[in-house]
Image: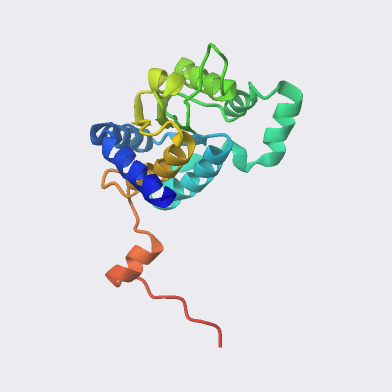
Amino acid sequence: MFTEHFLDAAQRAMAAIDPNAVEAMAEALAKVRDREGRLFLIGVGGSAGHASHATNDFRKICGFEAYCPTDNVSELTARINDEGWEGSFSAWLEGSRLRAADGLLIFSVGGGSVSPPVSANIVRAIQLAKARGATVTGIVGRDGGYTAQAADACVVIPTVDAELITPLVEGLAAVVWHGLVSHPKLAMNKGHWEQLAAGTKTAPQAAE
């Protein structure tokens, strides 16, 4: 049965994630916030959705000043049109005056590659961040590609099934970042339902 196979693969992949890498990433991100740095979250495709969702969580739960370039579709598409896809993220970061105090969080299945060029927009964003002295973190799959090589802290979701690389990496990336925003070193606020479960928040009343 496919569903049993998929769930088994997901369990094996989750079990293979290095908890020390997650802890190191939590520490690196906490240092960014503690020095009042901003956090920029980047991904393409499904990972762009992760970046957008995670931006909300890092802002609301963890108190970061966080931004996601793909949330501003007008600026992003203008930069792609005028400056090209490969430089779209790095140009956005330059416009945001990326500085050493800031952090970059990459979501990517393959992590990007210089040669052959894969996800070159992510690679160039990382290169800019390293040149500026900003902290680079990532949640990636396979061997992590360029992101894992260049990052200050990176969580790699290992390949346990070559037929399920993308769904498992993207699915478990969400598990990892939710673990990060719930981490004691990062979480400053509880989520809505956690507050209700703890009895610290009153449920909204339905309109009469």
* Residue 32: percent from left, percent from top: 37, 33
* Residue 200: percent from left, percent from top: 31, 70
- Image quadrant assignment for residue 143: top left
Point 27% across, 40% down: residue: 15
Point 51% across, 41% down: residue: 51
- Image quadrant assignment for residue 17: top left
Left or right for 108, reference 69: left
- Seen as rendered, the residue at the extreme front is 1
Q: Name the residue nearer the viewer: 69 or 94.
A: 69
- Judge whether 157 appears above or below 55 on screen: above
Q: Is residue 200 visible?
A: no
Left or right for 198, reference 119: left
- Seen as rendered, the residue at the extreme bottom is 208
* Residue 158: percent from left, percent from top: 35, 31
Q: Name the residue nearer the viewer: 35 or 71.
A: 71
Q: Name the residue nearer the viewer: 172 or 87.
A: 172
Q: Is residue 144 visible?
A: yes
* Residue 24: percent from left, percent from top: 27, 31
Point 50% across, 48% down: residue: 53
- Seen as rendered, the residue at the extreme left is 20
Tell how many labels.
Answer: 0
Q: Name the residue nearer the viewer: 17 or 34.
A: 17
- Judge whether 120 appears above or below 64 on screen: above
- Image quadrant assignment for residue 103: top left
